[in-house]
């Protein structure tokens, strides 16, 4: 029997504000525990929340970027549950009147056109953080995160594979980054998601029992968690026709490579929502929405089309570049400095990405200036240094700074184009490699590549390759 996978996501994104949603406390990450707190976010008796206007603007901006309907009237509700990370014993959120509804994101994935509908976007406050002490009979609470403004983006169950879910989340992340709605630092928890997954026999219309996977904050872990849960459910259906699948919340254990049950959900949990009596409804008129819409920057799909049409980049190159706001901006700044688009793309997607991955530096912190990469590209294309030397120069620029001209001078990497100097190296290589010379003269043309490589090695990558080829062919007759 063949099965179809059904996936929906609930994504929490921290909004790009300097202060919390209902008070003036800082949203700075990694502060001392409980340093960014006040009587409001600690829920002291008699305190009242005051809505941060920028939160509303950013939520509307997210809705517009995701093609949502903006509701001109929305309200805040109290979501009640008792847990130490919420001092009030309720979370201020939005229930029946969220700020945005009915959006959609479309993309291609593995040859399938995917349209993921956005059910809703609502505003809410984040909870605090519990720190469980190893071998200690107590838990610590850090309320710095309590009151951090969030939007929750809830999709319909429109994704049909873990790859589609990861692709959607990547696209969503880039949209939020382009719009400066969230910094989306997944390693800091600024973007995290819950995934709902179920399977059903191909052709069946009804949904089967779904399982929720909680708090995943990396693309790789999301894909691995969904693949493992997909496999687990398929095995249960084949073994027991699905009767052992229960509606529950599971967590992903990366070390063990499996999902683990946290709690069952026999029915939807009753949070006893009711309107927050301390906050008036949020009313947004059409001129305000239009003003926010006009502030939207060029979004990833628009930039993708422009990169393929204006810069003639391949679909793959444009896709990788526009998938990362900071890479795309660095590429375009390099082109504006005078570099050819294809050459700039090759350096950014080759040496730049490799160095970023090896060093663990995020693309928002690229340590090379676009003007310096442009000058390096010009030096390689003008034949002042070889491509091999250019890679060495780039590595030095990335790790320790400096201009390409300074590095070339310091390391003596200027390309050798003197015929006399190159001829001396060529003759020496011919003398030291009689077998390769014989192979070449007997019609084995690959031997020429080996001889060229030996000359390049002898010159430490500084020899002019075209001249080396020409001199070798001349000397070998």
Image (cartoon, rainbow, N blue to C red):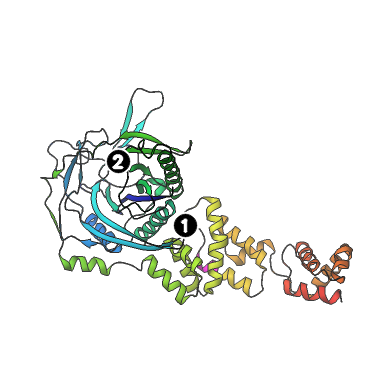
| Residue 158 drawn in magenta | no
Query: Which corner quadrant of the image does residue 302 belong to?
Result: bottom left
Q: Is residue 373 left or right of residue 14?
A: right
Residue situated in front as seen by the camera: 232 or 132: 232
- The magenta-colored residue range is 364-373
Please tell me whether the stretch drawn in magenta is mainly helix, strand or loop: helix
Residue situated in front as seen by the camera: 86 or 377: 86
Report x, y in % for residue 316. 50, 66
**Label 1 Cα crowd, 10 Å radius (few <14 / some 14-19 / many 20+):** some
Report x, y in % for residue 82. 22, 33
Which secondary structure, mark 2? loop
The residue labelled by disc 2 is: 144
Q: What's the distance in space between the residues labelled 2 and 1, CA to CA? A: 27 Å
Name the front one of labels 2 and 1.
1
**Label 2 Cα crowd, 10 Å radius (few <14 / some 14-19 / many 20+):** many
In the rendered image, the vertical position of residue 41 relative to residue 6, given as above or below: above
Res. 418 visible in picture: no
The residue labelled by disc 1 is: 363
């Amino acid at each position: 029997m063949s099965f179809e996978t059904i996936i929906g996501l609930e994504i929490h994104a921290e909004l790009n504000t300097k202060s919390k949603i209902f008070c003036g406390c800082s949203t700075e990450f990694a502060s001392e525990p409980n340093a960014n707190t006040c009587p409001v976010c600690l829920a002291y008796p008699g305190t009242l929340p005051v809505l941060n206007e920028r939160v509303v603007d950013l939520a509307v901006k997210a809705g517009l970027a995701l093609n949502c309907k903006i509701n001109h009237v929305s309200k805040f509700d109290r979501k009640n549950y008792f847990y130490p990370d919420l001092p009030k014993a309720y979370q201020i959120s939005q229930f029946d009147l969220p700020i945005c509804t009915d959006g959609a994101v479309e993309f291609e994935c593995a040859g399938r056109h995917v349209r993921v509908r956005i059910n809703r976007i609502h505003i809410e406050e984040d909870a605090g953080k519990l720190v469980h002490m190893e071998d200690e009979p107590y838990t610590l609470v850090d309320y710095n995160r309590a009151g951090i403004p969030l939007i929750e983006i809830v999709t319909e169950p429109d994704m049909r594979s873990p790859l589609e879910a990861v692709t959607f989340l990547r696209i969503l992340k880039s949209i939020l980054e382009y719009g400066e709605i969230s910094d989306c630092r997944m390693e800091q928890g600024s973007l995290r998601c819950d995934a709902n997954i179920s399977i059903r026999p191909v052709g069946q219309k009804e949904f089967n029992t779904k399982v929720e996977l909680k708090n995943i904050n990396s693309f790789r872990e999301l894909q691995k968690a969904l693949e493992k849960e997909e496999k687990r459910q398929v095995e249960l259906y084949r073994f027991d026709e699905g009767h052992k699948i229960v509606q529950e919340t599971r967590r992903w254990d990366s070390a063990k490579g499996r999902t683990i049950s946290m709690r069952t959900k026999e029915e939807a949990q009753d949070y006893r929502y009711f309107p927050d009596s301390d906050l008036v409804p949020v009313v947004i008129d059409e001129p305000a929405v239009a003003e926010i819409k006009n502030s939207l920057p060029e979004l990833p799909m628009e930039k993708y089309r422009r990169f393929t049409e204006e810069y003639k980049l391949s679909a793959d190159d444009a896709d990788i570049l526009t998938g990362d706001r900071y890479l795309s901006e660095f590429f375009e700044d390099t082109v504006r400095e005078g570099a050819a688009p294809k050459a700039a793309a090759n350096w950014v997607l080759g040496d730049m990405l490799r160095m970023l991955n090896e060093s663990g530096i995020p693309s928002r912190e690229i340590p090379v200036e676009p003007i310096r990469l442009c000058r390096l590209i010009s030096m390689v294309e003008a034949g002042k240094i070889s491509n091999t030397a250019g890679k060495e120069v780039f590595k030095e620029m990335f790790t320790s700074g400096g201009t390409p001209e300074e590095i070339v001078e310091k390391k003596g990497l200027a390309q050798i184009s003197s015929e006399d100097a190159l001829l001396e190296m060529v003759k020496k290589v011919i003398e030291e490699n009689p077998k390769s010379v014989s192979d070449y003269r007997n019609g084995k043309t690959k031997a020429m590549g080996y001889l060229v490589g030996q000359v390049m090695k002898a010159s430490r990558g500084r020899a002019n390759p075209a001249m080396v080829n020409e001199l070798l062919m001349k000397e070998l007759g």
